[in-house]
Amino acid sequence: MLDLGTQAPDFTLPDQNGDMRSLSDFRGQKVVLYFYPKDMTAGCTKQACAFGDLYPQFREKGAVVIGISKDTVASHKKFEDKYGLPFILLSDTEKEVIQAYDVWKEKKNYGKVSMGVVRTTYLIDEEGVIVKAFGKVKAADNPAQMLEEL
């Protein structure tokens, strides 16, 4: 994970509509930036839907929510449409941002070792500085936890 108090690495990635979005576009707002393994999987769906349910409260607190995975733009669009997600999903198929934020790690699942995204959430302040970082978060609990952090 990246250190607290450091400048969050800027990036530009396509969202679920194919529009290019940069972290710097959100200067002046708090950003809840969460990295997740895969669209349409049980844990990722729970996390995304909980962020969606709480999204009006995040907006009231001046924050935007951005989810990033290595899924394609088309996959993100299906995920958004199926669950009515009101926030931005960014596609990082090359894993450049995933690696820049140090969330591409060795994972063990039922004794099998593989590389993948470790579910991680960063809170970035209005100046683009990382003020909170949570690794290996519980998918269902993470959105409420982040709202509390705000």
Image (cartoon, grey):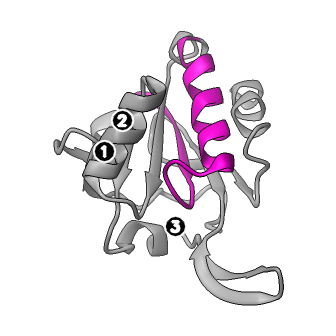
Does 26 sit left or right of 122 as displayed?
Answer: left
Residue drawn at x 49%, y 51% as measured from the top left: 39
- Compared with residue 31, is residue 9 higher up or lower down, i.e. above or below? below
Q: Residue 74 carries which label?
A: none
Residue drawn at x 55%, y 24% as measured from the top left: 52
- Compared with residue 24, is residue 106 higher up or lower down, i.e. above or below? below
Callout 1 amino acid: Ser
| Contact between labelled residues 2 and 1, with CB atoms less than 8 Å apart | yes
Circle 2 residues within 10 Å: few <14, some 14–19, many ≥20:
some
Q: Give the magenta-colored segment's residue range.
A: 27-56
Q: Magenta span has 47?
A: yes
What is the spatial separation of the Cα atoms under label 3 and label 2, in whole angstroms?
Answer: 18 Å
Residue on which disc 3 sits:
101
Callout 3 amino acid: Tyr
Residue on which disc 1 sits:
24
Judge whether residue 131 can be spotted in this image: no
- Is 102 or 30 nearer to us in this picture? 102
Q: Residue 83: give x, y in percent of width and height.
A: 48, 28
Secondary structure at badge 3 equals: loop
